[in-house]
Amino acid sequence: MEFLSSGPLASGWATLALAAVLFGALRLGAFLLKPLGIPAAELSPLEEKLFSLALGITALSLLVLLLGLAGGLNDVVLWTVLVGCVFLRGPANRLERFHFTVVERFLLVVGGGILFLSWLQALAPPTGNDALAYHLAHPREFLLKGGISHLELTRESLWPYQTEMLFTLGLLLQGTILAQLMHWLFFGLTAVLIFSLGKRFYGQRAGLLSALVFLLTPAAFAQSGQAYVDLSLAFFMLAAAYALVLRGTLGETPSALLAGLMCGAALGTKYLALGPAAILWALLLFERRGFKPVFIFMLSALAVSAVWYARSWVILGNPVYPFFAGVFGGHGFESQAGKHVGFGKDWLSFLLFPWNVTMHPDRFGGEIIGPLYLMLAPLALLKPEKTSRTGVILGAFTSLTLIFLFTQSQHARFALSVLPVLAVGAGVGLDKAVSAGGLLKKTVLLVFSCVMLAHGFIYVYRTHKVLAVVSGRVNVEKYLSEHERSYQGHRYLREHLKEGQSVFNAAESRVFYGPKSAVIISDGQPLRESLTRRGVSLRDFLGREQFDMLWLSAGSDSDILAFARAGGYVQDYAYSFTEEPATYEYLFFKKVS
């Protein structure tokens, strides 16, 4: 099947390709520092490389978009671009020397082990729900169509797709492994960025502990193995906050410019960044440093992100489709995402939000944050030093972003956008507890060690499940048939549909593994809204379109099941798949000749 890859050779090639993309992005970003007026010499060598990577990755994503809009997506062109980036000249290369204690080296080994396990996890075939529904499915469609465009009757194809451009690049240059490694990359980059921030403001040990707290977050580890966008959002939001607190190092204007560019990259990644971006802008405004930094922050953020929102506004009449339809002339619809997540939005639920999201992950989407943030972050208040601008900005940003997330959507994985900043607080708290000595030190280290071991076992278990397919001992067909609910259905369609035939899919949102030669129309809110506007019933639509096959489930709407059984179609195939806690019953109806 196109773009699907697995096995040791494919994994090795994908990892080498990732290194090439990373090096090209680093050179491109370093080249951009000088014309942007950012004084690289004022940054530490590590900070310079991290911000260069952030700029380079953003520029590469926008370049892929530009090529896609022009119908010029081609592996030769993209490899040429990456090779060309190698010859770009930036600031003189500087190396930073680190001196680690024995304990700090142990922390590095643990962190490296976690990154290795997460790398193995990312080498397996894709199974993530949103990845197969659109994060990977839409880049696949773009490549099959030869260009990037709006995909009719989809909710997401005009969303901010900066990270999806990296997935498009990955699919084109190698396949699914490289695409997933593009997101895995941000797991490590975010940890290094956390270390860098912690080291600058709170000391090297605090920086290492902060990075390890983040790496020990089960939700982040799970995300790193799939082609999602939450870790890239976390990276760019942290980079934006980091740049903002570097005002004393970079100066007013360069700091605001860099923070705005990083914020723009976050806005180009996900709508969810609108809240944190507005919070950073408000914090900058609150400092009353004049209009110029505020204007530069806004302008640079728009320069990077405006294209995503403008496309949606021009094509669909709503820059944040399908949200806020009432504001944008009815273009869109009310989203039900997050409506039934959490314990409510009253004051008591707000006060208990940190406790509840930690102790009741099943009520917040199932992702596990872990106890370290709740346990360690308050310890940062031990022996409070003189209030610093850095602490105030990071604390205010974290608090206000958590309030925003609580009011908008309480999915635990959405909190990944602010967890890196919170990890710094937790790492500083742990460092202070260790420095305090006595019973507090022993208790905190004991609990931290137990959590580290428990999460380590979870990570090993998760990785163990993919080793067979990653090593090539189990073929991809067998692995996906056992671990991914939609694969058997798509295999049936690929085997039984002829080129140009059509399918009405009212059973499954995951479409990545579907046949490339068939026309698949998925039931969903965009289709239903379109039919309502035209005054056409779903039954009339099905009768008129005369689909060659219907993919339904036992839980499909009764009118669709009634249509399938009323005549003209015969059930040709069925299968069930258990994905805890649910069991899916799929039914396939074939049109009678």
Image (cartoon, grey):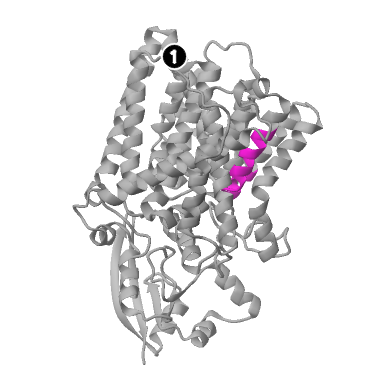
- Of 191 and 584, nearer the camera is 191
Apparent side of residue 242 relative to residue 551 in the rendered image (left or right): right
Callout 1 amino acid = Ala
Quarter of the figure with the C terminus = bottom left
| Other residues around mark 1 within 10 Å, as few (<14) / some (14–19) / many (≥20) | many
Apparent side of residue 438 relative to residue 521 in the rendered image (left or right): left
Which quadrant would residue 136 be assigned to in this image? bottom left
- Chief secondary structure of the magenta portion: helix
Which quadrant would residue 300 be assigned to in this image? top right
Q: Give coordinates of residue 540: x percent, y percent.
A: 54, 85
- Residue range (magenta): 257-274
User: In this rendering, does residue 399 appear at all?
Assistant: no
Quarter of the figure with the N terminus = bottom left
Q: Which residue is mark 1?
A: 433
- Of 162 and 400, nearer the camera is 162
| Residue sitting farthest toward the right | 291
User: In this rendering, does residue 78 appear at all?
Assistant: yes
Q: What residue is rendered at 29% in x and 67% in y? A: 576
